[in-house]
Image (cartoon, rainbow, N blue to C red):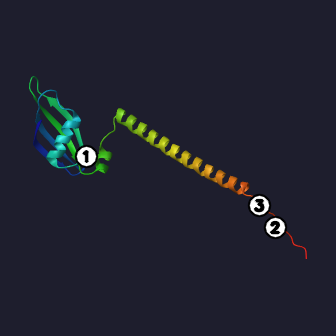
Amino acid sequence: MDLTISNKFNNQLLGRIDVVGEINFSGATPSNAEVASAIAKNLKVKEDLIVVKQILTKFSSQSAKFKAVSYKDPAAKAKFEVATKHLKAQAEKKAKEETEKKAAELEAKQKAEEEAAATAETKETEAPVEAPSEEKS
């Protein structure tokens, strides 16, 4: 895949660089993730800060035009990019799994503490307690 950037616009207000260019490829049209990784290599930025807006293929040719943006930092990306329905669902699912994992870890920790306390109590009760002998003089 050969990527050429034809136009870069530094959008300081939104904290991003708007990029327009062309891709020459063989086979199927590259995915947004593949285009984002190629742009990230070309601009020398992190791949997760790139958002591909469009890939417009030319009929019966192995080339396409693209529009993408490269954010300066993750905060700017979070502020200006709208999460789609499936991305929101993925984020909710991930958050739910994390809370379940934390709850399971907390439960296991409490159970271990209870078992440790129970074994300590049984050791105290099992130890023979000798009454002090009184000596009569």
Q: Secondary structure at mark 1?
A: helix
Mark 3–mark 2 Cα distance, whole angstroms, equals: 9 Å
Image marks 1 and 3: residues in contact by CB distance under 8 Å? no
Looking at the rendered structure, the kind of residue marked 3 is Val
- Which residue, given by chain and number where applicable, does mark 3 sit on? 129
- Which residue, given by chain and number where applicable, does mark 2 sit on? 132
Residue count near mark 2 (Cα–Cα under 10 Å), binned few <14, some 14–19, many ≥20: few
Which quadrant of the figure has residue 137? bottom right
Q: Of residues 41 and 133, which is closer to you in this image?
A: 133
Tell me where residue 37 appears, x and y as whole percent: 20, 41
Looking at the rendered structure, the kind of residue marked 2 is Pro
Position of residue 25 relative to residue 42, above or below, is above
Tell me where residue 87 appears, x and y as whole percent: 35, 36
- Which residue ends up furthest to the right in the rendered image? 137
Residue appearing at x 48%, y 42% in the figure: 101
Looking at the rendered structure, the kind of residue marked 1 is Leu
- Which residue, given by chain and number where applicable, does mark 1 sit on? 49
Mark 2–mark 1 Cα distance, whole angstroms, equals: 76 Å
